[in-house]
Amino acid sequence: MTETVTPIKKAKQRAADISNERESAVSGDQEMAIRQLANDLHRLNHAVMKAVDAGVSVELVRSARHHGGNGNWGDMMVPVIVKG
């Protein structure tokens, strides 16, 4: 019997593939920065859920873009809060 590939399973597999590709293409310092970012995003998502559960709506909006000077960039975010 064949296993059905759901969109969620497909997305998880793609994320795993990207992670494996990244591990072979980045330095140790880059990997550490990526892991820290992922951990911080997890905490941010948890904080968003707590705010929503407390009765407000939360939208994250890009406020600026940070340029590292060597072609790399990152979006800076701010929350827009609406009382429910």
Image: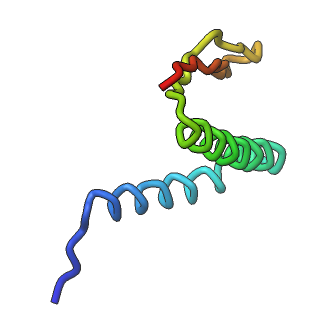
Q: Nearer the viewer, residue 24 or 58?
A: 58
Note whether 41 is above or below 21 in the view shown: above
Residue 9's x, y, as percent?
Answer: 34, 64
Q: Image check: 44 left or right of 62?
A: right
Note whether 10 is above or below 56 in the view shown: below
Residue extending farthest top: 64
- Which quadrant holds residue 5? bottom left
Q: Nearer the viewer, residue 62 or 27?
A: 62
Residue extending farthest left: 1
Residue 46's x, y, as percent?
Answer: 63, 46
- Which quadrant holds residue 2? bottom left
Count every numbered label the image shows and give the total: 0
Q: Image check: 49 left or right of 5?
A: right
Residue at the (53%, 27%) spot, across then down = 58
Colouring convention used in this rendered image of the protein: rainbow
Residue 47's x, y, as percent?
Answer: 66, 41
Note whether 40 is above or below 5 in the view shown: above
Residue 56's x, y, as percent?
Answer: 54, 29
Residue extending farthest right: 29
- Which quadrant holds residue 30? top right
Residue at the (65%, 12%) spot, across then down = 65
Q: Nearer the viewer, residue 46 or 37?
A: 46
Q: Quadrant of the N terminus?
A: bottom left
Q: Nearer the viewer, residue 60 or 2?
A: 60
Residue at the (71%, 13%) spot, across then down = 67
Note whether 12 is above or below 54 in the view shown: below
